Image (cartoon, rainbow, N blue to C red):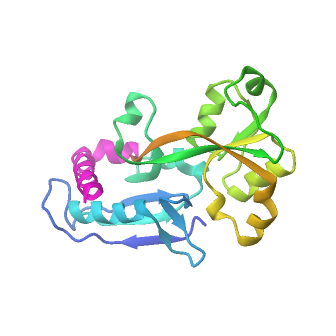
């Protein structure tokens, strides 16, 4: 999927210090598995985040492109010297990460997925030390599991593979955003009646500027924040 790109050139609506047609574009990346930026069967990205990106970049007058990338590449994309933005990104982390956040612009619910007939207390010590769990590879939920002492198995960048791990008894649970809308009709019919889903909480989400974008064009990042707020309010 990494080769699918969606390109939009924002119209200049305001003159800003780092904007204008002569400036290099900003490269947006998303994994396409959330309702905020969902890759449709026909190859089109739809969702609130997609619309906000277009509105924001039109307001700042800077060209952009939007590309699909697996979650496992998100850290490389945001650690890069290139002028990248990953969306959606959990609005948390250390000061250097928070300084690069554009947003938040929404919240995403988070769920535990268990096999049918099985339900656990994810906060219990027994679950943490005995259950084998996984998450999207490279996600903030993967980092959460690793940082909080859960028994962890390396996950996948693909929702269908995560579900296979669970139904094949390779793991006891998945911690993830909602991916059920990404399943085909056949997958939903065959799998969802074999799964218990527990709503666990919500996460604020933002757009995360890369280290290179924040370093080289801090004024643009600030302007993107202002524009995003206006687009969200409108």
In the image, residue 82 above or below residue 134: below
Residue 78, percent across and down? 46, 46
**Left-right relation of 173 to 87:** right
The quadrant holding residue 160 is bottom right
Find the magenta span and give its range: 209-234
Q: Residue at x 71, y 23 (%)?
A: 124
211 or 140: which is nearer to us? 140
Find the residue positioned furthest to the right: 168
Q: Position of residue 151 (x, y in %)?
A: 76, 29
**Residue beneath the point at 41% across and 61% down:** 48
* Residue extending farthest top: 125
Instruction: State yes or no: residue 232 in magenta.
Output: yes
Is 111 magenta? The answer is: no
Whole-percent x, y for residue 165 in the image? 80, 49
- Extreme-bottom residue of the structure: 42
Residue at figure coordinates x 56%, y 69% from the top left: 3
Q: Position of residue 43 (x, y in %)?
A: 55, 75
**Residue at position x 74%, y 51% from top?**
162
Q: Nearer the viewer, residue 16 or 179?
A: 179
């Amino acid at each position: 999927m990494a080769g699918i790109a969606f390109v939009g050139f924002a119209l200049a609506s305001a003159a800003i210090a780092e904007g204008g047609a002569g400036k290099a574009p900003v490269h947006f990346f998303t994994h396409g598995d959330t309702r905020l930026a969902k890759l449709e069967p026909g190859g089109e990205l739809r969702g609130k985040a997609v619309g906000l990106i277009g509105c924001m970049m039109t307001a700042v007058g800077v060209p952009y492109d939007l590309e699909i990338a697996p979650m496992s590449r998100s850290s490389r994309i945001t650690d890069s010297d290139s002028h990248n933005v990953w969306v959606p990104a959990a609005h948390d982390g250390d000061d250097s990460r928070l300084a690069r956040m554009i947003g938040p612009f929404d919240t995403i619910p988070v769920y535990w997925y268990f096999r049918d007939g099985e339900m656990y207390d994810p906060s219990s010590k027994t679950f943490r030390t005995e259950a084998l769990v996984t998450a999207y590879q490279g996600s903030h939920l993967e980092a959460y599991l690793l940082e909080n002492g859960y028994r962890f198995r390396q996950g996948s960048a693909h929702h269908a593979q995560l579900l296979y791990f669970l139904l094949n008894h390779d793991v006891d649970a998945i911690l993830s955003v909602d991916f059920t809308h990404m399943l085909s009709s056949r997958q939903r019919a065959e799998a969802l009646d074999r799964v218990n889903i527990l709503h666990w909480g919500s996460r604020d989400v933002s757009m995360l500027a890369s280290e290179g974008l924040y370093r080289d064009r801090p004024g643009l990042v600030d302007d993107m924040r202002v524009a995003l707020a206006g687009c969200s309010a409108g």
